[in-house]
């Protein structure tokens, strides 16, 4: 039975309104003479990838149509039909904040199930966003309560006092290498390099709240055998700090790694990464295997495993409270500044650093505008800006995971899950080391790395 299916999808309103077909005047997109006429108006500057996939699924494999494929590209400004070879002449405005899809005279039995899937995905997406902001707001209220309590304890002026910390001498230690800049496609990256240039490249990626200095122990250990390079990721320290969440999508961050390797004059590297750098390295090593000879990760979960764990493990959700809190504007930056960046000092004193080394971190993050870009990593990541990145753990190169088991932010269930997912990944645990394992127990980390690299 043939009938008319009128589906009006509003990205900003999530199907809350469904005007009658007669009130909608779709723009003409000529796909030629089809068995069933299709009129489609698409207005979305950045339609998320999962929705594009589901929309294509609504067309592909549909027996009642005689065109082979409708491809929705990321800009959503063009559409193609491979059989008809037609291309629309009036692309929709990128300023639109909604999209509309109108199916005319399609086979209801064929389209309806897929349309229901699309509605379900959109509803789930909305529910996730609402839940994310509810949890973030809860921790925001708790933080405000904590700040008010501290005002009564130590006073307003002392709590809300901060200043730029002077640069300590350890940041100019020549033994750590020479400083330089790489000009990538859209950012300038600061790096520190040492070791013979004819040796294999060992590239270090830091986490939050860190910068290249976090790898000083490993730089000194491996600079005789490798060309060691530690760089400040975009948004950190002396590297460029682009604005907006889109600048910190996983796609952008992986592109930076690729461009850094090439700009240094190498085709591949031994990639060593921690925390946020590790999260990027998990994806980069799987999706760009030709650029990674060996992969070493420290206290960072693969995205696929972490997503599953945080949904089913209440303990990990509690440990990850700060990720939700960081979704809020302004308040996380304020929390890190109060009492002259006391929170940053507390974090790194637990690793056994001396005051000069702690001041190196305070110097970097006390600079004007230094906090928001690193926090945007979390905001972009949890909100999946730029689209989700999917990958498995079937790596082409050898992989080593070093895990400090005294981590208060990440559960020990993560290395267990990695071993279970892929037994070929070597997992080495350091029982008494905390999250910043390469600083907390550098001798153990260096020993594990060297033994594994020599295998």
Image (spheres, rainbow, N blue to C red):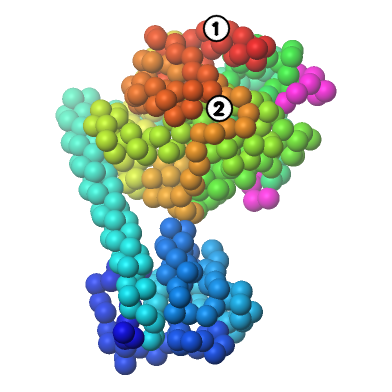
- How many angstroms separate mark 2 from mark 1 (CA)? 17 Å
With 233 as the anchor, is 181 left or right in this view? Answer: right
The residue lying at 39 percent from left, 85 percent from top is 104
Q: Please, what secondary structure does the residue beneath circle 1 have?
A: helix
The correct choice, above or below, for 327 with respect to 125 in the image is: above
Residue at the spot x=52%, y=68% of the render?
Answer: 72
Q: Residue furthest right?
A: 198
Q: Quadrant of residue 372?
A: top left
Label 2: few (<14), some (14–19) or many (≥20) C-alpha neighbours in 10 Å: many
The reply to whether residue 256 is visible in this rendering is: yes
In the depicted structure, whether residue 445 falls above or below residue 302: above
- In the picture, the quarter occupied by the C terminus is top right
Q: Is residue 153 above or below residue 353?
A: below
32 lies above or below 213: below
Q: Position of residue 73 (x, y in %)?
A: 55, 66
Q: Position of residue 262 (x, y in %)?
A: 74, 39
Q: Earlier in the sequence, mark 2 or mark 1?
A: 2
For label 1, the residue is 443
Task: Confirm whether the magenta stretch covers residue 200.
Answer: yes
Any part of residue 230 in sight: no
Range of residues picked out in magenta: 185-201
The foreground one among 446 and 310 is 310
Is 199 magenta? The answer is yes
Q: Is 286 placed left or right of 97 in the picture?
A: right
**Quick one: 147 or 233, which is closer to the camera?**
233
Determine which residue is flagged by label 2.
273
Q: In the picture, residue 451 is in which quadrant?
A: top right
Marks counted in the figure total 2
Which residue is pictured at 36% across the width and 15% down the height?
406
Front residue of 417/172: it is: 417
> Is disc 2 placed on a helix, strand or loop?
strand
């Amino acid at each position: 039975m043939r009938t008319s299916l009128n589906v009006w999808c509003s990205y900003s309103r999530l199907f809350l309104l469904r005007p009658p077909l007669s009130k909608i005047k779709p723009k003409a997109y000529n796909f030629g003479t089809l068995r069933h006429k299709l009129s489609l108006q698409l207005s979305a500057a950045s339609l998320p990838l999962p929705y594009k996939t589901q929309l294509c699924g609504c067309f592909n494999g549909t027996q009642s149509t005689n065109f082979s494929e409708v491809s929705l590209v990321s800009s959503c400004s063009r559409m193609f039909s491979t059989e008809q070879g037609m291309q629309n002449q009036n692309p929709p405005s990128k300023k639109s904040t909604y999209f509309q899809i109108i199916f005319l005279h399609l086979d209801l039995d064929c389209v309806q199930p897929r349309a229901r899937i699309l509605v379900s995905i959109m509803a789930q997406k909305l529910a996730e966003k609402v839940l994310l902001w509810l949890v973030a707001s809860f921790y925001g209220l708790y933080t405000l309560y904590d700040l008010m309590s501290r005002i009564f304890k130590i006073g307003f002026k002392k709590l809300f006092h901060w200043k730029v910390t002077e640069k300590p001498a350890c940041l100019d230690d020549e033994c750590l290498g020479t400083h330089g800049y790489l000009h990538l496609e859209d950012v300038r990256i600061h790096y520190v390099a040492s070791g013979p240039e004819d040796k294999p490249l060992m590239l270090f990626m830091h986490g939050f709240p860190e910068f290249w200095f976090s790898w000083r122990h490993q730089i000194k250990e491996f600079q005789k055998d490798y060309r060691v390079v530690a760089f400040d990721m975009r948004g950190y320290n002396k590297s460029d700090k682009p604005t907006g969440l889109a600048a910190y999508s996983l796609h952008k961050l992986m592109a930076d790694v690729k461009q850094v390797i090439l700009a240094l004059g190498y085709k591949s590297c031994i990639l060593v990464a921690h925390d946020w750098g590790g999260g990027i390295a998990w994806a980069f090593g799987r999706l760009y295997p030709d650029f990674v000879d060996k992969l070493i990760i420290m206290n960072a979960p693969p995205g696929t495993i972490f997503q599953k764990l945080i949904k089913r493990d209440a303990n990990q959700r509690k440990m990850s409270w700060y990720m939700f809190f960081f979704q809020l504007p302004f308040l996380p930056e304020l929390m890190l500044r109060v009492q002259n960046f006391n929170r940053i000092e507390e974090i790194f004193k637990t690793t056994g650093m001396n005051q000069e080394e702690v001041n190196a971190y305070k110097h970097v993050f006390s600079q004007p505008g230094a906090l928001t870009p690193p926090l945007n990593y979390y905001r972009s990541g949890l909100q999946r800006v730029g689209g989700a990145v999917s990958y498995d753990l079937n790596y082409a190169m050898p992989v080593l995971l070093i895990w400090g088991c005294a981590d208060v932010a990440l559960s020990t269930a993560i290395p267990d899950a990695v071993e279970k997912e892929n037994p070929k990944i070597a997992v080495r645990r350091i029982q008494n080391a905390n999250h910043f394992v390469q600083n907390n127990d550098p001798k153990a980390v260096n020993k594990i790395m060297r033994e594994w690299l020599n295998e």
